Image (cartoon, helix red, strand yellow):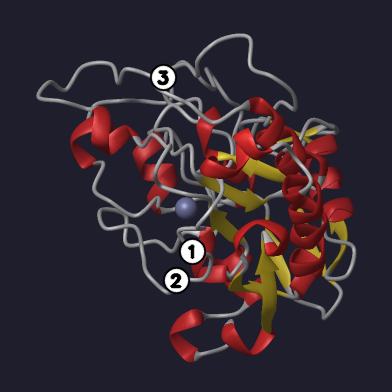
Amino acid sequence: MEWLSRRQFLAGVGLASLAPALPRSSWAADRVSGVSLLRFEKLVASYPDLLAKIEDATLVWKDGTRMPLDDGVKGKSFEQMLRNASLADQLRQTYKRGKPAQNPGIDESPGRIRHEGFFTRMYGDCKKAEVTKRMRNVRWMPKTKSQVIQVSTVNDVAGRLERVIAELDGMPDRFKAFLVPSAGTYNCRVVVDTGKPSMHASGAAIDVSTAKSDYWVWARGKGTGAIPYRNKIPFEIVEAFEKENFVWGGKWYHYDTMHFEYRPEMFEV
Ligand SMILES: [Zn+2]
């Protein structure tokens, strides 16, 4: 999922609770735009096939591409970051491994903010048919109810997902109803209100079964107040994905409990 309108809920929701008084556009010894240099180093280490180093507040790719860590835009709201994220914005939140002690706070959605150019450079532009060329078939739940899905080979996402599948397929039968059929992987669509691609457009995300999933859009009801959190996905399933550095949409304020995407840079340093 992750492509329906969320304008109503994001309107008026600022970033104040997340990142107060950030020093911006400054190359300090240990921070860029308020984000620890350790997070940027983690970013480089997370994608060793493609990224080379951080140098002068710039991400340097192995092919020579250079991307500034900060875009110099001050005081962005959460919605503005969803639409136009810098690399620093992408790393402002941290995804915590393990069973959540509480429901996500407002706009606590580690992984939802993505620098578009970064992922287009990495996985290709789906509108130019660059993403599909780098995908291969993967068998989803072959011992349960085999289904062919397409997954990116970049960063060996396909191989990593196959290791997740091996664990999921070996779980007791009571878990299977949450998993089959998969609601899909690759989809060259953008999020309606932001116009930005989700990780499905990179072939690096998967939705498990919709049957027992919860999505904030389905639960929002009539009001525009806080979104009631819902989830039925057993944590054992989430854990299998987290072992291979997929983040779970069930840990987002705008939750999407069927959704997993490969985002190793989002995990704690
Ligand atoms: Zn999804």
Circle 2: element type: loop
Q: Which of labels 1 and 3 is toward the front? A: 1
Image position of 47 with respect to 138: above or below: above
| Residue 135 horizontal/vertical position (percent) | 66, 81
Dot 1: within a 10 Å radius of its alpha carbon, few (fewer than 14), some, or many (20 or more) residues? many
Q: Is mark 1 within 8 Å of ligand 1?
A: yes
Dot 3: within a 10 Å radius of its alpha carbon, few (fewer than 14), some, or many (20 or more) residues? some
Q: In front here: 85 or 255?
A: 255
Of the image marks 1 and 3, the number of the one nearer the N terminus: 3
Dot 2: within a 10 Å radius of its alpha carbon, few (fewer than 14), some, or many (20 or more) residues? some
Quarter-of-image position of residue 133:
bottom right
Image position of 249 with respect to 188: above or below: above
Q: Which label sits on residue 184?
A: 1
Q: In front here: 202 or 78?
A: 202
Q: What amino acid is at disc 1?
A: Gly
CB within 8 Å, label 2 to label 1: yes
| Residue 85 horizontal/vertical position (percent) | 50, 50
Q: What amino acid is at disc 2?
A: Asn
Q: What amino acid is at disc 3?
A: Ile
Circle 3: element type: loop
Alpha carbons under labels 3 and 2: distance apart? 28 Å
| Residue 161 horizontal/vertical position (percent) | 74, 59
Residue 245 appears in the rendering: no
Circle 1: element type: loop
Taking the spot 28% from the left edge, 16% from the top edge, the residue there is 226
Taking the spot 58% from the left edge, 72% from the top edge, the residue there is 120
Quarter-of-image position of residue 39:
top right
Taking the spot 26% from the left edge, 58% from the top edge, the residue there is 192
Please give the residue where the numbered disc 3 appears in the rendered image: 106
**Which image quarter holds the C terminus?**
top right
CB within 8 Å, label 1 to label 3: no
Please give the residue where the numbered disc 2 appears in the rendered image: 187
